[in-house]
């Protein structure tokens, strides 16, 4: 076998080996990360579907309430629930947009890796072809027939068969990589389109939320036009809050820890204007006297509400027709705090919170004529004047 023929065959074999190594190194592409991002997006889309189903049920309830001419507070409670679902939709859509950001970044990285892989595969193939051209490669038949012996001819035949098979694999793998590139581009385009749609949906839900808030607030204010309807709503709210307070007293009597966490209470929000103090007050329309069990702090919708002290969240839920979305924190030693009419709860039952943690946002859920925080300090489950426990400043 001539030295030139040996060089040619060696170059061909080296090219095949080089390509095989390149393919093996580049083929693995962040499979775990891809699955994780896709699973997150899928989970969030399922959450959105569930929320849409929940909203559809509430809308049916609202139509039934309207048809039966049920009380204003019944309708307000349904509207509050609709607002809550919309708030959760907005949170979920925001999470979906962030998850799609991750998915888009991953798809872009996978596309870049696949394109780099294709370039390296093609270059490996072209390098081998260039070597053959530069060396003036004789025909395959010529290489076989120029063998020095029968055994040499068999060896050459096997080598050439391997080279031909390698060429076929090279071309098939290049075609497969190009197909992968097309697939990655499609995933990337789909993710970008899905994110653009999510952003449009987000704007729609935000506009819808604003309209729902206006409708709920207008509904309560409209009570002023009907003394009888106002009195009915007032009585319903009083009964609802009394029932909630009774349940709380029972709950706190069994769940309150023995030792107070210590320290002074902090003011529960940035706003400082008190619109209604603790104590007996006469309603301007019904003229009925009632006990206001806390203080009302006037504030803009969505203002952050802080834990007045460290402790354990024993309630984070809904009180229809009364407190609306509310949270109760047990601070130990028989002391607890209550935060009501939230637009959004940002904690959960059983959570350990530190003084100053954000636990919710100011709203107007429940019996409320406008956004404010109703704040109570409870001693052994019984209300007391909050102003005794801290300075407003």
Image (tube, rainbow, N blue to C red):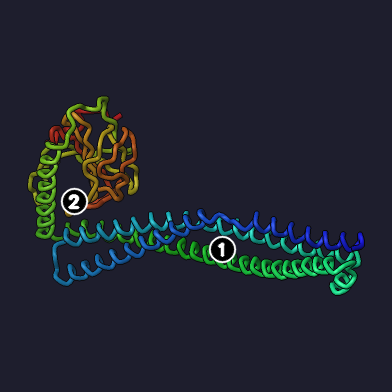
The foreground one among 21 and 48 is: 21
Give the class, few, some or many, for how many residues have Cα within 10 Å of label 1's Cα (few <14, many ≥20).
Answer: many
Q: For the point 56% across and 66% down, which residue is it?
A: 189
Task: Report x, y in % for residue 310.
Answer: 28, 32
Quadrant in which the N terminus is drawn: bottom right
Q: For the point 69% across and 63% down, which residue is it?
A: 118
Q: For the point 83% across and 62% down, which residue is it?
A: 9
Q: Residue furthest top?
A: 263
Q: For the point 20% across and 26% down, which residue is it?
A: 259
Q: Is residue 309 above or below residue 214?
A: above
Checking the image for residue 175, the label placed there is none
Q: Residue furthest bottom?
A: 141
Would you name the residue on which mark 2 appears? 319
The answer to whether residue 368 is visible is no
The foreground one among 300 and 137 is: 137
Would you name the residue on which mark 1 appears? 188
User: Which one is closest to the eye, mark 1 or mark 2?
Assistant: 1
């Amino acid at each position: 076998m001539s030295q030139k023929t040996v060089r040619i065959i060696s170059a061909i074999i080296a090219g095949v080996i080089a390509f095989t190594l390149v393919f093996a190194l580049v083929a693995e592409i962040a499979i775990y990360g891809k699955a994780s991002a896709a699973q997150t997006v899928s989970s969030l889309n399922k959450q959105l579907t569930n929320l849409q189903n929940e909203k559809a049920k509430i809308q049916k309830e609202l139509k039934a309430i309207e048809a039966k001419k049920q009380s204003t507070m019944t309708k307000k409670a349904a509207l509050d629930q609709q607002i809550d679902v919309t708030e959760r939709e907005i949170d979920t859509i925001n999470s979906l947009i962030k998850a799609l950001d991750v998915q888009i970044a991953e798809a872009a990285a996978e596309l870049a890796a696949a394109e780099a892989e294709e370039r390296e595969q093609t270059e490996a193939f072209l390098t081998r072809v260039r070597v053959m051209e530069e060396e003036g490669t004789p025909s395959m038949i010529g290489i076989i027939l120029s063998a020095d012996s029968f055994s040499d001819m068999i060896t050459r035949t096997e080598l050439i068969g391997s080279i031909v098979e390698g060429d076929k694999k090279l071309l098939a793998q290049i075609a497969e990589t190009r197909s992968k590139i097309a697939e990655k581009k499609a995933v990337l385009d789909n993710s970008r389109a899905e994110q653009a749609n999510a952003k449009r949906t987000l704007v729609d839900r935000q506009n819808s939320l604003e309209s729902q808030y206006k409708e709920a607030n207008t509904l309560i204010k409209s009570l002023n036009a009907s003394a009888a309807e106002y009195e009915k709503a007032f009585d319903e709210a009083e009964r609802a809050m009394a029932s909630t307070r009774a349940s709380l007293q029972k709950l706190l009597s069994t769940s309150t820890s023995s030792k107070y966490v210590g320290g002074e209470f902090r003011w529960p929000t940035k706003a400082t204007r008190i619109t209604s103090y603790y104590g007996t007050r006469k309603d301007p329309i019904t003229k009925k006297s009632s006990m206001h069990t806390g203080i009302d702090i006037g504030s803009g919708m969505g203002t952050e509400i802080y834990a007045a002290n460290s402790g354990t969240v024993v309630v984070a839920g809904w009180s229809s027709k009364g407190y609306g979305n509310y949270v109760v924190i047990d601070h130990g030693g028989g002391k607890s705090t209550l935060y009501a009419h939230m637009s959004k709860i940002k904690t959960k039952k059983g959570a350990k919170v530190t003084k100053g943690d954000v636990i919710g946002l100011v709203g107007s859920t429940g019996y409320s004529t406008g956004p404010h925080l109703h704040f109570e300090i409870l001693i052994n489950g019984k209300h007391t004047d909050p102003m005794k426990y801290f300075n407003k400043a």
